[in-house]
Amino acid sequence: MFPRIDTHTHILPSNLPEDYYKNYSQEETYVHFKCCSDDKHCNVKMFKGDKFFREVEPNCFHAEPRLDDMKRTQVDVQVLSTVPVMFSYWDNVDDAVDLAQRINNELIEIVQKNQTKFIALATLPMSHPEKAIEELERVMKINGVVGIEVGSNVQKLQLSNPKFEPIWAACERLNAAVFVHPWNMPREKYVSKYWLPYVSFATLFSYCIMLFFSTFSTLSTLSDILMFFTPFPT
């Protein structure tokens, strides 16, 4: 019997200080967390700047309740990735790298403590390809990290943009899977040109644009692209 693997399971960093962004650029809006009680394993409220975003349960932060859920639902392995709202696709390179590494380090810690139950998809500072490749090379050396999660666009740049070609080439070289997740999808410019007025699925749209721009033409072995074909809730 094949193992039951859930490839789309997000987790947030439990060790991230509430004011982790205090030394970051003030040009961006950051996500932060507030526990609903003094209990470590309580629900947590997420805010984007001063606006409430959503409330999440302990299994979105901690491995233990997640393992209980897996047993109850008969899932053998979860592929962990960050929640897209935590993507650090900012202009400030130091801030972007810092948060990506914080998130990845905790993913790695969880995976290494539960090597038969979890594998990880890292996040990268995609706006800065050289730094993104450095982080990719770092995490892919670690057992249990199998690839990356990326948004369906990066600061409104399509993934077909030549800026990202070195990243895809590095993924191919390192045999890193690429999981494309819906994220802030700008459609208007491309919909009419490529006859896609009825495509509402951001990841499918992003993939089509990559095909149209021949992004994959020189990447003969980059085949492990996991696509999520439902809209990201807003």
Image (cartoon, rainbow, N blue to C red):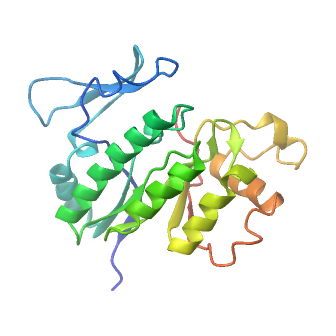
169 left or right of 20?
right
**Residue 78 place in picture, x, y as percent:** 33, 62
195 left or right of 9?
right
Q: Quadrant of the N terminus?
A: bottom left
Asked whether the viewer can see residue 85, the reply is no
Residue at image x 30%, y 68%?
77
Residue at image x 37%, y 69%?
141
For this orientation, the residue located farthest to the left is 39
**Residue 190 place in picture, x, y as percent:** 83, 42
Residue 197 higher or lower than 4, as above or below: above
Residue 188 higher or lower than 6, as above or below: above
Residue at image x 48%, y 49%?
124
Residue 93 higher or lower than 216, as above or below: above
Residue at image x 38%, y 39%?
99
Q: How many marks?
A: 0
**Residue 84 place in picture, x, y as percent:** 47, 41
Residue 61 higher or lower than 167, as above or below: above
Q: Name the residue nearer the viewer: 156 or 198.
A: 156
Asked whether the viewer can see residue 107, the reply is yes
67 left or right of 85?
left
Q: Name the residue nearer the viewer: 5 or 25.
A: 25
**Residue 98 place in picture, x, y as percent:** 38, 39
Residue 184 falls in image quadrant: top right
For this orientation, the residue located farthest to the top is 50
